[in-house]
Structure formats: C-alpha cells, structure tokens
C-alpha cells in the first residue's frame, strides 16, 4: 500500500459516526486537491476496519454501485441526515 493511501485511510478513520466527508475534501486535506478520483480508488480497496460508508460525493450522493444501498443503510443507522432526493445533507453531516 502506498503512503497516499495510508494518509487517506487515516483521514477517513477520523470521521466520527453520524458525519461524512467527500472524496474531494479528503484530497484537499492531504494537499492534493485534484486527486479525488485517486481517493475513490483507494476507498474501493480499503481495509475492512475503515468506515468506508462515510465517504460520499461532494453533492452528498451515495455511490458504490451494488454497495450503495448498504452504505446508505449504515449511514442512516449512524443518524446521518438525508435530503428528500436521497443525497446526504452535507450542510448537516459534512465535516467542513
């Protein structure tokens, strides 16, 4: 595993239950503002103990293909608020 991925996982581990962070926010925190896609690649192969469900798109969309419903369910269990259109309410649950 490369160092950037370790840094990504460290940031994600710091996101508390009931909160979310976007791929782009993680990239900016790590000083690589144009690396949101690389963050996404890292999250696809993250270790099991990482709270992967807490990483969403900048607009609050829950991604993950076949895993998106599981991700949404986990976020709902943590108390993450959603908008009527199904996106996470980033103003209420975002980390910035």
Image (tube, rainbow, N blue to C red):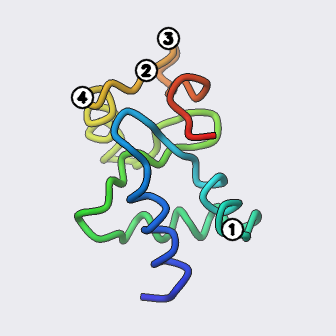
Tag on residue 77? 4
- The one nearer the camera, 65 or 36, is 36
Disc 3: which residue: 84
Q: Secondary structure at mark 3?
A: loop
Disc 1 to disc 2, how far (Cα)? 27 Å
66 in relation to 1, above or below: above
The residue located at (68%, 68%) in the rendering is 35
The residue located at (59%, 70%) in the rendering is 38
Q: Secondary structure at mark 2?
A: loop
- The one nearer the camera, 22 or 29, is 29
* Quarter holding residue 29: bottom right
Estimate how packed mark 2 is, as few (under 14), some (14 to 19) or many (20 or more) residues with alpha carbons within 10 Å. Answer: some
Estimate how packed mark 3 is, as few (under 14), some (14 to 19) or many (20 or more) residues with alpha carbons within 10 Å. Answer: few
Disc 1 to disc 4, how far (Cα)? 29 Å
- The one nearer the camera, 24 or 41, is 24
The residue located at (33%, 33%) in the rendering is 75
Disc 2: which residue: 81
Tag 4–tag 3 contact (CB < 8 Å): no
Answer with left or right where residue 7 lies relative to residue 29.
Answer: left
Answer with left or right where residue 54 lies relative to residue 36.
Answer: left
Answer with left or right where residue 7 lies relative to residue 25.
Answer: left
The residue located at (65%, 68%) in the rendering is 30
Disc 4 to disc 2, how far (Cα)? 10 Å
Q: Position of residue 45 (x, y in %)?
A: 36, 71
Disc 1: which residue: 35
Answer with left or right where residue 9 lies relative to residue 92.
Answer: left
Q: Quadrant of the N terminus?
A: bottom left
Q: Position of residue 47 (x, y in %)?
A: 29, 71
Tag 4–tag 2 contact (CB < 8 Å): no
Q: Which sits earlier in the primary sequence, circle 4 or circle 3? A: 4
Q: Which sits earlier in the primary sequence, circle 1 or circle 3? A: 1
Q: Which sits earlier in the primary sequence, circle 1 or circle 2? A: 1
């Amino acid at each position: 595993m490369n160092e950037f991925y370790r840094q990504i996982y460290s940031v994600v581990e710091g996101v508390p239950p009931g909160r979310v962070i976007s791929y782009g926010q993680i990239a900016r925190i790590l000083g690589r503002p144009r690396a949101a896609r690389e963050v996404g690649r890292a999250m696809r192969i993250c270790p099991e103990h990482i709270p992967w469900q807490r990483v969403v798109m900048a607009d609050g969309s829950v991604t993950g293909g076949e895993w998106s419903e599981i991700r949404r369910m986990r976020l709902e269990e943590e108390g993450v608020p959603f908008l009527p259109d199904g996106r996470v309410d980033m103003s209420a649950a975002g980390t910035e």
